[in-house]
Image (tube, rainbow, N blue to C red):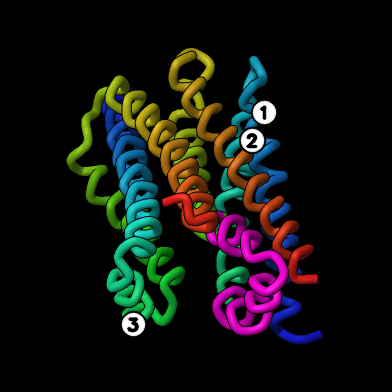
Amino acid sequence: MTLHTASLILHIVLGLSAIAFSYLVLMHLLHRNLELTFLKRISLAAFLLYLASWLTAGYYYVDFYGKSVKPLVVKSYPWAHSVFMESKEHIFLFLPALSLVAYLIILFAGERLSADATLKRRVVWIAALTFLIGVYVTLSGVLVSGAAR
Amino acid sequence: MNDNIKEQNKNKILSGFAASAILSVVVVAALTIGGEIYLPLKNWLKVTFYHHWIGKGVISFSILLVGGGIFSFISSREGGSLRRLLSLLIVVTVLGTFSIIGFFVFESFHLL
């Protein structure tokens, strides 16, 4: 197995895990009684996993994708690169910011969330956006991989 | 330190990072679309950071962390301000997402 293949596999595993944790954060925020210790752990895990997925993606994308995969995709399905790869790689950059804000709110204002319905709604929206953007990024990755094959 | 001051300090930190997240999202969207329209900007990112995507990542993450620290000092202690900043973060993220996807759809199919 080459280092590029290993980084791609790690990127996929870490990214999917981050999205799974984002989904967990969203679902647990919707509970009436919040389990704060658990929420703090899973929201921190989501943030750290997005960072780790970002680093492994960066190595694969910068060092391998442009030279070896992009020409194949552009030749057969140019829109797969020009729409989905381009939007995926840039929208992904929103995820560390959103997941960090969600984690910090749960960490510093978690105890207020049950009493402050407005603040809780905002965090739910941020968690939902993080999850939905993560799903879009994942599906775009699947589409680009399919186009390369 | 009484509980009220602790809560106000927490609000300042949260408002600071909400503000830096807003700025980070706006800068990513601006550099992405701006770099495609004005190629010298994309080339500057490539030359400075080895790859334009690394440049956008380094700039956005620096804004998030450094900006979060700086904005925490100057942010309001009020909970209402935090809620408004979070609303703005949601709006800016939705707009940024659709702007980037829309831009690449239009550019790809030569609709611009």
Q: Nearer the viewer, mark 3 or mark 2?
A: 3
Q: Are marks 1 and 2 in contact (CB under 8 Å)?
A: yes
How far across and how far down the image is residue A49, in percent? 62, 56
Q: Quadrant of residue B91?
A: top left
Q: Are marks 3 and 1 in contact (CB under 8 Å)?
A: no
How far across and how far down the image is residue B89, in percent? 39, 35
Q: Quadrant of residue A145?
A: bottom right
Q: As shown in the figure, which amino acid type bears the numbered disc 3?
A: Val
How far across and how far down the image is residue B90, in percent? 44, 32
Helix, strand or loop under label 2: helix
Q: As shown in the figure, which amino acid type bears the numbered disc 1?
A: His
Q: Which residues are magenta?
A: A60-87
* B67 lies above or below B81: below
Residue at (21%, 30%) from the top-left corner?
A: B76
Residue at (68%, 44%) from the top-left corner?
A: A21
- State which chain disc 1 sits on: A
Left or right: A60 with respect to A118?
A: right
Residue at (71%, 84%) from the top-left corner?
A: A3
**Which residue does the numbered mark 1 point to in the structure image?**
A28
* B47 lies above or below A109: below
In this view, which residue lies farthest toward the bottom?
Answer: A2
Mark 3–mark 1 Cα distance, whole angstroms, equals: 44 Å
Q: Residues within 10 Å of mark 3 (few under 14, many from 20)?
A: few
- State which chain disc 2 sits on: A
Helix, strand or loop under label 3: helix
Q: Main secondary structure of the magenta part?
A: helix
**Which residue does the numbered mark 3 point to in the structure image?**
B47
**Which residue does the numbered mark 2 point to in the structure image?**
A25
